[in-house]
Amino acid sequence: MPEKSLQLKYIDIHTHKASDKEVIQIVDRSGKPCCNDYEQNYFSIGLHPWHIQKAKIDDELMRIVSNIHHKSFLAIGECGLDKICDTDYSLQLSVFKKIIAISEEYKKPLILHVVKSYNEIIELRKDTKAKQSWIIHGYNGSSQLVAELIKHGFYLSFGRHLIIKHSKAAKALAQVSMERIFFETDDSDFSIQEIFDIAAKTFDCNLNQLQSNIAKNFKAVFNQNLKT
């Protein structure tokens, strides 16, 4: 990564828009061709449950593996389980178990898409005895579920739902230790700065303190040193 990237203070761990040079980003390149911006941004590749096609599963998994040693490849994702999408749920489970195996073999964290499948995700983490970090992206679940997820070693990433006052995400964030969180923009038009500002108010802390904690989490999960 360019040396100047290490000076940036905002960290966006999941975005589909490689556009903000003032932010350290992990850009989701799933389903997209390789391109030169791999050298300018960290990236992830996964197989989203919405996009699973039986005939293409092996190719998609091979794409993950073939890119996994790239110096900027930090995570596998999005991947996960979604009970309300059209993809057969048993097929989702089968694919996700294969992705977990890849994650463990190559020691890469997972960025998870989870819809109405939190119990299943928790059970899979226990059953597989996974050691790599699992990050639930775009968390908008209940505050009651937070303790159970943290107990089993999950990180929670918060994004656009924080902008909505009195949302489940806003209530949940107040229940999470700063040592287990990340922030993201996903495919929204909100800036990561807006999301950090709201989070700092939720924690009643200054922005530098929040940025410092997220940088520590980033190092712990992605093995990357960042100067803040």
Image (tube, rainbow, N blue to C red):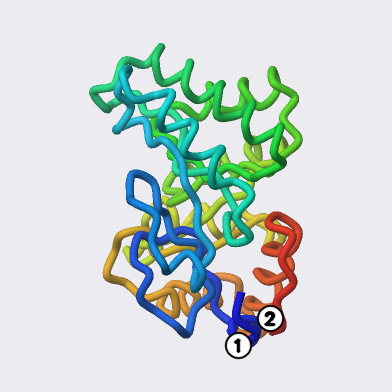
Closest to the observer: 207 or 38?
Answer: 38
Q: Position of residue 122 (x, y in %)?
A: 61, 27
Residue on which disc 2 sits = 209
Left or right of 154, for residue 49:
left
Question: Mark 1: few, some, or many residues within 10 Å (few <14, many ≥20)?
Answer: few
Residue at image position (41%, 50%) is 168
Quickly name the residue at label 1.
Answer: 4
Camera-near label (1 vs 2) is 1
Q: Which badge, 1 or 2, is on the more N-terminal residue?
A: 1
The answer to whether residue 158 is seen in the rendering is yes
Nearest the viewer among 10 and 104 is 104
Q: Residues within 10 Å of mark 2 (few under 14, many from 20)?
A: few
Q: Is mark 2 on a helix, strand or loop?
A: helix
Q: Position of residue 119 (x, y in %)?
A: 54, 24
**Which residue is the extreme one toward the left?**
86
Towards the viewer: 162 or 134: 134
The amino acid pointed to by label 1 is: Lys
* Residue plotted at (37% across, 16% down): 89
Q: Quadrant of residue 66?
A: top right
Can residue 150 be seen? Answer: no
Judge left or right: residue 227 versus residue 121: right
**SS of the residue under disc 1:** helix
On the rendered image, what quadrant is the N terminus found in? bottom right
Which residue does the image show at 54% across and 47% down from the upper left? 67
Residue 169 picture location, percent across and down: 44, 54
